[in-house]
Amino acid sequence: MTGRALTGHGLTGRALTEVAPGVWTATAEIWTSLTTVIVAADGSSLVVDPGISVAELRGLGREVVARGWAVAAGFATHPHWDHVLWDAALGESPRWATPSAVGYAREHRTHNLTESAGATPGLDESLLGLLTPLPDGAAEVPWTGPRAVVVPHEGHCPGHAGLVLPAAGVLLAGDMLSDLEVPLLDLRSADPIGDYRAGLDGLEAAAAEHGARVLVPGHGHVGDAAELARRLRVDRAYLDDLDADRPSPDPRLATDWIAVEHARHVAWRRAR
Ligand SMILES: [Zn+2]
């Protein structure tokens, strides 16, 4: 049976879309969460933020096998629960993350288990947040496939990192640069807005340095270079409005749960 035959049938494999040469994405049912699979010429694969439901995690594992690929490594963009899920169907390869992300995942394991329980019934809890820290100062994900440059920054969550894939011209932005979500700030930081601005600057610089022309956010939709520029602009405008305590005209605030997060930001800003 070919991978193509499995694609989109739901019960077995998971639908994948090739967004750049050798770079495939799948969309989870909740929060328009995007998983990325980077496939080397020999079929070895790097899985970034593998999905949410058990069916999605297992379906991805089956799809990879059906296409003749093999999971060689994972990468978690950050230690929020919806980015550190895993299933035995994806194998036992290391799931890399920044050292501070690994520390955060350990510290918040109970919280992550509670949060995931509702959305991922049947999850093998022993595999949640089982991350391997990148070697100190590692500039790239340690695997034998196409280079995946790590772009660590603060702003959304401790230990967050985007990845740039120079050969394919792709920026994987984790929970940054979404078309559906305004910047979601780490309010426990000493300078949440400053951190977030620095994070956007770092991602923009890395995308420019490595010629990224395709943007894959952790939640939302894939975009081109013009869309990357637009998202940088609207995210910065959101931060400027928040910093100045002005009302934000951002249309992403029409989503109920985003409006709740925005209200938290405003309350924090006014208490500052
Ligand atoms: Zn997050």
Image: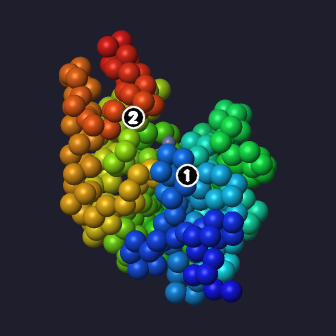
Determine the residue positioned at 42% across, 30% down: 256
Using the rendered view, name the quadrant where residue 45 is placed: bottom right
Q: Name the residue under label 1.
A: 29
Q: Residue 152 in the image: x percent, y percent?
A: 43, 51
> Taking the image as drawn, is residue 155 in sight?
no
CB-based contact (under 8 Å), mark 2 and mark 1: no
Using the rendered view, name the quadrant where residue 228 is placed: bottom left
Give the class, few, some or many, for how many residues have Cα within 10 Å of label 2's Cα (few <14, many ≥20).
few
Where disc 2 sits, the SS reads loop
Which three-letter amino acid code belongs to the residue tagged 1?
Answer: Glu
Q: Mark 2 points at which residue?
A: 255
> Taking the image as drawn, is residue 29 in sight?
yes
Q: Seen from this angle, which residue lies furthest top?
A: 271
Distance from label 2 to label 1 (Cα)? 16 Å
Up the image or down, 77 lies above or below 107; here it is below
Q: Residue 194 in the image: x percent, y percent?
A: 31, 34
**If the image is split into quadrants, where does the N terminus sit?**
bottom right
Lower sequence index among marks 2 and 1: 1
Up the image or down, 33 lies above or below 197; here it is below
Q: Residue 97 in the image: x percent, y percent?
A: 57, 54
- On whether ligand 1 comes within 8 Å of the CB at mark 2, the answer is no
Determine the residue positioned at 70% across, 34% down: 114
Determine the residue positioned at 64% across, 59% down: 56
Which three-letter amino acid code belongs to the residue tagged 2?
Answer: Thr
In the visual, does 152 lie left or right of 69? left
Give the class, few, some or many, for how many residues have Cα within 10 Å of label 1's Cα (few <14, many ≥20).
few
| Viewer-closest of 175 and 186 | 175
Using the rendered view, name the quadrant where residue 189 is placed: top left
- On whether ligand 1 comes within 8 Å of the CB at mark 1, the answer is no
**If the image is split into quadrants, where does the C terminus sit?**
top left
